[in-house]
Each structure stands twice: as C-alpha cells, then as structure tokens.
Amino acid sequence: MAVPSAFVICLASLLNASLAEESSVWTPGDAAKVLPGMIPAPAEIPGLGRWQAMTFPVSTYVETVRFSPDGKHFAFGDGLYVRIHRTSSMRLTGVLVGHTGNVKSVAWSPDGRMLASAGEDQTARIWQASGVPGPILKGHQGTVTKVCWHPEGTSVATCSLDGTIRLWQADGTAGAVIKGHDSPVHALDWHPDGKLLAAGDEKQVVRLWNSDGSPGAELTGHVGTVSVVKFSPDGSQLATGSTGIISGQSNQHPPMVRVWTATGDAGPVLKGHRNSITDIAWSPDGKQIITAAEGTPRVILWTAEGQEIGKMEQETPSPANVFSIDWHPKHDLFLAGGRLRVRYLNMKGRTGPARLVRSGGSKLMFVDWNPQDGKIAVAGRDGKIDIWSSDLSSKRRIDAFPSPVNCVRWSPDGRHLASIAYQTLKIWDSEGKQVREFPIEGSVSRDLQWSADGKLLAACTRFRGNVYVFDMDRQILQFADHDGQIHGVGFSPDAKTLVTGGGDSTVRIFNLSEGSTSATSRNVMEVLNDGHVDCLGFSPDGKWIASGHNTTLRLWKPDGTAEKVIPAVSASLMRLDWRSDSGAIATAGWDTSVKIWNPQGKLLRTLPSHSAPCWGVSFSPDGKKIASCGWDGMLRVMDAETGDVLSFANYVSDSVEVENDAVRGSRTVELLQAPMSFNRAGQLLTGDSNVLEMRLVYLVEQANGAMKIYKPSQFFAKVEGASLARTEPHGKN
C-alpha cells in the first residue's frame, strides 16, 4: 500500500534562526506563577508573560495520536502537553498546556474546531483547535483513560480507572455518570449515530450503553483487559482489542481482536499479534482494519471480515512498540505513536521524515551521587557515562561501553566509579580514567553495589542469574541461586551478608564467608503476589532491607522478617536509594514517579515526575537534594524538602555526518547524545547553543490562554537581560 504521490512529506527545517547576542543575567519571578513541563520553575517575565520550554522532537511514550477530520493536522499527547502539527510538513503549529499528569487520550471534534484531552491528573479538558483553553472536566477519581466526542460535537464522554463513564456538555456541564463497570475502564467509543457507547474494562468485558446511561448488551470472549473499542465509520460493526494479560498473572495469553455487529453479535476473531493490542483504526470506507500492538508484529492490516492482508514486522532500523495508530481520512497513510516517537507508516514500513523520533541513546539508565565531593554520575543507554558537577554547570564525559550502561556506583570514599554493561564491568577513577576491567557472564547486567568499606564490589546479571563479588584486583566469588533473572544486589554494612532479588519473585539473603570466597543461603522471602523484585538495598544502619516490586515497596528485617508493604506505584519500582541517615527511601518508578518514604511507610514527598519511565534516583550526601533520571532524557537536581527543581539537564539527540569508508565520497548521519543543562531560570549552563536552537521551543502564554511558539533565539531576543550564551559555571570538576 503506497502513499499516493500527491501526498508530499516536506522536510523543511523547524528551527533555523540566529542566536541572540549575549547580555546580562536575569532572575526568575513569582514562584506561584509556574507552568508545568520541562522547566517547573518560576517563569514570569515582565511584558512577556508566563513561559515554558518544551523539548523537540518527543519526550515520552506517545499513547495517543489522532488526525484532524480533514487530515491537514494531527494531535498527540507528549507527556503533559498536547501537540498539534501540520500533516504535510510535521511543522509544530500548536501546543496545549494545562495537564499536570501525562496525557492519555486526545480527540478532535467532528468539525475539527475543538479538541478534547484526558490524562493522569484525573481531568479531561476541552480546547479550541487554535489553542485557547476551555472547560476543565473534573469528577473522576482516577486516571482518565479515554475521551471521545459525540458525533454531533455537542458533548464528550470520558472513562476512567475509577470504573466510571461520565458524560459532559461541551461547555463543561456535567451529565450522567455510568457506574455499571466493576473494574477500571480503559476503552470508549461513540456509535456514529450518537445513540450508543461501547466501553471495555479490566475484567475482559465490553459493555454497550445507551446515550441516557441505561445498559445494553454485554460482550464477552476477550482474555485480559479490553484496551480498545472502535465502531466502523458506518456503525455496522464494532472492533475490540485486548491485552492478553490478566491481573495477578505473570504469563501473556494470546491477545485478540474481535469484530461484532453493532448490536453485539459475535463475528470474526483476528489472531496474529503476540503481545497486547494497543489500538485499532478503521479505513475511511470501513472495509479494512489496522491493528497495533506491543512487540512484533507491530502492525497488521485486515479485511473487515477478518482476513489478514499484510503486516509490518518492525520499524527499521530499530524496532519500536506502537501504542496508538490512526488512519488518514483520505490516504492509505497511518500515524503511529510509540516509545519516544511519532511516525508516518504504510504497509511497507516507515515513511516520511524522522523529525518526531527521539534517539534511543537519549535514555538515561542510572544516577549516583558521589558521597564525598558532590559529583553526579549518570549512565546512558548510548554507552556513555557523564560526570556532572552538583549544580550541573559542568561535566566530563566517558566513552565507556559500546552497549547501554545499566548501572554506575561511586565507591564510599568517592575515589572510584564502578560501571556495568553487557558482559563487562569497568572501574574508573574520579577523573574518568579506566583503572580496572572484569569480564562477566550472563548477558544483560543490572546492578552493582560496593561494600561500606569500599573493599568489595558485588554485581548481578539479569539473564542466567549470576552474582559476582570482586575486590579491586580480581573476581573472588561467582554463584547462581535464583531461578532466573537477578535484578538487584546489596551488601549489609558489615559486608558479612549479601541480599539479592530477581525475576523469580524472591528476595534471598546469603552469609558470606571470611574473605567472601563463598556464600551460604540463609533466607528466601517469596513475594509471588506482587511479581518481580526489581531493586533492593540495605539501609546504611543495617536495620532494614528495602525491595521494589510491581506496585509495592516492601521492608524487611535483616533476618528476613517481613515488615511494611507499601502501595507505592502503579507500575514497577525500578530503583531505590536510602538517605545516609537511614531515615528515608527515594524511589524511581516505571510509572514515571519520584517519591520519598520513611521506613514506617509514610509518603514524605512526591517530586516532579518524568514523562517516561524513571530509572534512577539518588540522595545527595547530606540528604537535602535528590537527583533523578529517566528514559525521557531528563536529569534533574531537586530540593528533597520542597520538590523544587534546582537545575536540570536535557539529553537530546544531535546528528553529525561521518565518512563511509566502504563507499568513497559518501556520508552517513550518526545520532549522538547532546546534553544541555539549565539553571532554574531556564538559562543554558552547558551545551551547544545551536543544538538548543534545533531541539527546544519556548511557549509564551497569550492573553487568551493560548501558547505562542518561539524559537529559542526569538524568545531570548524578547527578554531583556536573557542570553543563550553559557553562563559562568559555579564550580569545576
């Protein structure tokens, strides 16, 4: 299915203006006038208004993409933003700012003049397509998972993890509340005649509801959460998709797409995907269906009768999950949203510019604060390690591995930095010079931990489940005791005990022999009802072991006695870090969260979340600050007490041309990390101003609430005393 030749993808540059001249430093304004987003800092400029900076191209997992009814624009959710782009050129034409939780759903009104959005902040919002904000729809008690317009464009319907469906007028007036589902509702769609709603829930059921809220047919047969429901354009059929994952079970069942009549009679069952169905789109004529899923095959095209036409196995050069898909109203062209990307697709694969694709190398995997001199080490998925000053005003880069760096840990005396990647462990001095290298077996390496005296270093591997113990000269111990992957490892303060956790849903405690040449299993603690153990660690005073799981943070006594079970997150806890006084635990979640707890299970502080899974969190030596990093390419230094962002670095991708030795005279483009750091006033501390010009835009609030889009140079030219030039660093590495 080729894209019609009349449909031209323009490659015009988004940002190409010259930089503003250097001028004096300026300071932020009223702390109460804050806009959410990449710079959650005071941002009021006299004569200009409130402003916000936004990463370009994409900063998060894109879970919703939709073409406008005329096909000339598309909208998608990018973290806290709804972004609007021209279809022909991908030029950014509008940004809707207001959500304080990630955007889960966007929908155009039938006439294309308005947009509705829904998010994790438990609200839905209505906007003019020009960007002017309208009513905020409040009432749900959980994430609003879907919003859809009535075919007449006079109202919207929303559904939520709170198990309800709510109806609203376009002016924000609340209508009926439908409470017939007894589990979270993930999917919703209006019938084209506006008399019927279809909804899918977590208990594998699709329910039809009349527009007055009275119940209709109940459709069963799915396995796992019903993730999407879509009526055909003429309303004669309903397509539904499921995840194949049942709550409380770790195994993946075959997901399926089912087609029904509009009255609920069962029709074809479409089997071909192996992982969760994420979205469905009908062709404009209703004769074909395209389905998207996590994992391969990512996209399959079917006839409405259920016959497979073709599939796209993966998006080359690198595979990427597809979380949302939409069919252009006039062309055989698909808009796909996925991990850090929005792409045009046809059945031959990806097509058009890669402008809205963020390099995978921008993902950050781990962060650790030097306990002595305040330097911050950050591990990157591109194999690099950056060592930053504590205020992010300067950095040193280590070209460490050819594969992702999964963990970095400073030694207790701050003189060495251990790092682990694919089958290799390397140790560096504090200036970034390599001093040791050890081979390890077991594929993906996951965690490292120094003993409190700095004499021993433990490591574990995810696959084959190996645990290693090294001194500075050699490997002194290797063993495998878990039934599968090992995700976390930690020493007791006296280095006589080692604790491990893994994919077999156990935390295991081992006694180490004198000299740490052997390990004897002492306790095995099972947590089968909450899945894998994804991270763990002893408290510095040795009184506690903390472990992170699918949704909980658990505390144990060193003898294995179970203590508090804390409902901490909505998705896996990827990392945790103890404060040096053992009085608090910081957690980083797959659900993007950053939180601080005390050992009694009380939530002390929720810090600004990331817009993609958070993979790193670390207390400063004095416990007054926290650094966090994630797959959105953001590194933040925050005040642990107030949650204020003090400085941050944004890892974007830059491209360079390199010679191709195999073909004389040819050049290829190579994507590189290009980190830029900022103070809380939004000034550039480190990084290339030219990259800033290409990878960020500034949004300035207008009198009507809409956001005007400025290139960085345009923005700073309007701000008296602002500069794109690097400020003088406050300290050197």
Image: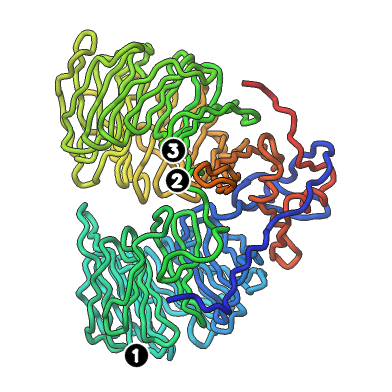
Measure how far apart labels 2 and 3 are at the Cα level.
15 Å
The color scheme shown is rainbow
Q: Element type at marker 2?
A: loop
Q: Element type at marker 3?
A: strand
Q: Which residue is drawn at 38% across and 69% down?
A: 279
Is 465 or 435 nearer to us in this picture? 435
Name the residue tied to disc 2.
Answer: 593
Residue 464 found in image quarter: top left
Give the amino acid at mark 1. Ser
**Label placed on residue 236:** 1
Does residue 15 sit above or below 225 in this rendering?
Answer: above
Q: Element type at marker 1?
A: loop
Q: Residue at x 55, y 28 (%)?
A: 397
Measure how far apart labels 1 and 2 are at the Cα level.
42 Å
Residue 302 found in image quarter: bottom left
Name the residue tied to disc 3.
Answer: 365
